[in-house]
Image (spheres, rainbow, N blue to C red):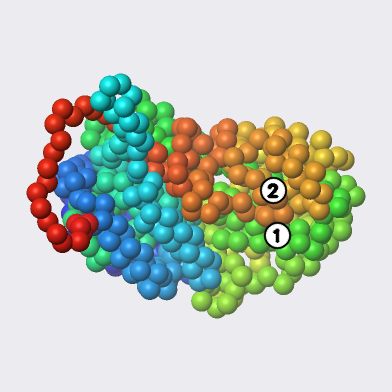
Amino acid sequence: MDIVDHWISGARFAGESTRTAPVYNPAEGVVAREVRLGSVADVEAAIASAKAAFPGWAETSMAKRQQILFSFRELLNARKGDLAEILTAEHGKVIGDALGEIARGLEVVEWATGFPHLLKGEYSENVSSSVDVYSTKEPLGVIGIISPFNFPAMVPLWYFPIAIAAGNTVVLKPSEKDPSASIWMADLFKEAGLPDGVLNVVNGDKVAVDALLESPDIASISFVGSTPIARYIYETGTKHGKRVQALGGAKNHMLVLPDADLELVADSAVNAGFGSAGERCMAISVIVAVEPVADALIEKISSRMSALSVGEGHRGCDMGPLITKEHRDKVSGYIDLATVDGAKVVVDGRGVKVDGDADGFWLGPTLIDAVPTDSKVYLDEIFGPVLSIVRVKSYEEGIALINSSQYGNGSAVFTNDGGAARRFQREVQTGMVGINVPIPVPIGYYSFGGWKDSLFGDTKAYGPQGFHFFTREKAVTRRWLDPSHAGVNLGFPENK
């Protein structure tokens, strides 16, 4: 059986650890390959490689760094079909969804190519007699990145292109459930001209995570995952003197006002609730319906759900399987719980007919009405294709319900009333807001992140805050007593 190795110093690396974990094909329910689970020594080897590469990469000119990033962007765009195949094989998402994930990752790569402008400092002349003050932005050193299973390409692309553009070197720890995408991208970046050791990938479980968090040679940690783990990452990393951005879980609400276009709402709810099998932190998992719209909306959503197809990613289906059998069974358990708690299961995804192998980790789109707000079905981040309906009597009741959540990742309002939309935008306590947009993931040149228990640390991902996170500022106060002279050269100046 194939084994997914680490990637250290520009080559595949087996390491010393003999521990492995299965990597499944979720659509078939079978183990497709094994992945090595790195030991502390393996993590230290990756860190040592990044540390050795850092001085040379930090001193590499911006022009050269930019050329390599442009080359990586071109290669990634040209071969995105190959990467999409890897995502479908290991995560299970359909090919179209995989290509969409890569496209959103490419946005951040494209944003990162403009880094010379983003690394410019400030300048003040003659603050005192013949004294000038200016600032520079410098890299931190070795960056640790811990990415989740649900977006094996996009989430790493949120981080390592920016970290590398800023002059840092990187150790990436992908999810052991679908690790091959990270190895593939590291190999591609080398082909683009990235020096060995600048980007390293070490596979593993908690042993590898803790080794990154505790290493004195790691300057910062970026993480995306569930809230309990995000809190652990943040607390452990900061305790060991690291700068940490840890993006946690979510329970995203869609507030539907009575004047909303229900056809648009139904389309948006299905797209945002069941895309990527609901395994995304920006999925809409709760529709807060301001009466009297709930019954009509449920009818429209149910009609659309009946037309959805579930199956293997290459067969033109709308939705694929969940990542593992254990996760599928956990999500399925919430449907049982809903009935116990008094909710009404309108569309039950258990036992769904699939276009694929019967042993795959399947669960169809599920719609549950009248979910009590004290039920775990409402309170927990289910992370699967389960959409809940909560009925409220007014906008005020709906906004109060949303703001009472422990999470503050994203939210959306659907309305044709500009005043109501503006009020929602100002009053809702989430970091990302959609107005008639169900999944308000910001474009690459804005920053991604939530509030409350959806984000630990004070810096969001990618965009301007991404460059802020991966650099530190130095202020220089300067006086020159004599002019300098560079000699005569009539050639046109060239950046090198």
Q: Which residue is mark 1?
A: 268
Residue 178 lies left or right of residue 338; in this view the side is: left
- Camera-nearest residue between 137 and 124: 124
* Extreme-right residue of the structure: 292
Residue 447 screen position, x and y as percent = 50, 45
Q: Residue at x 73, y 63 (%)?
A: 267
Contact between labelled residues 2 and 1, with CB atoms less than 8 Å apart: yes
Q: Is residue 384 above or below residue 214?
A: below
Helix, strand or loop at label 1? It is: helix
Residue type at the position of mark 1: Ser
Q: Locate residue 353, reporting x and y percent.
A: 65, 71
Residue 132, x across and y down, in percent: 29, 28
First in residue order: circle 1 vs circle 2: 1
Q: Which quadrant: the N terminus? A: bottom left
Q: Left or right: 93 with respect to 389?
A: left
Query: What secondary structure is marked by label 2?
Result: strand
Depth order, front residue of 93/99: 99
How many marks the image carries: the answer is 2
**Residue at (76% x, 39% y) in the render:** 423
The image quarter containing residue 76 is bottom left
Residue 472 left/right relative to 343? left
Q: Which residue type does callout 2 highlight?
A: Ala
Residue 412: which disc?
2
* Whole-number angstrom distance, CA of label 1 to CA of label 2: 10 Å
Residue at 45% over, 41% down: 465
* Other-residue count near label 1 (Cα within 10 Å), few / some / many at <14 / 14–19 / ≥20: some
Pick whichever, 29 or 472, lies toward us: 472
Expressed as whole percent of the image width and height from the top left, the position of residue 102 reads: 45, 63
Q: Is residue 412 visible?
A: yes
Q: Residue at x 60, y 56 (%)?
A: 278
- Viewer-proximal residue among 492 and 35: 492
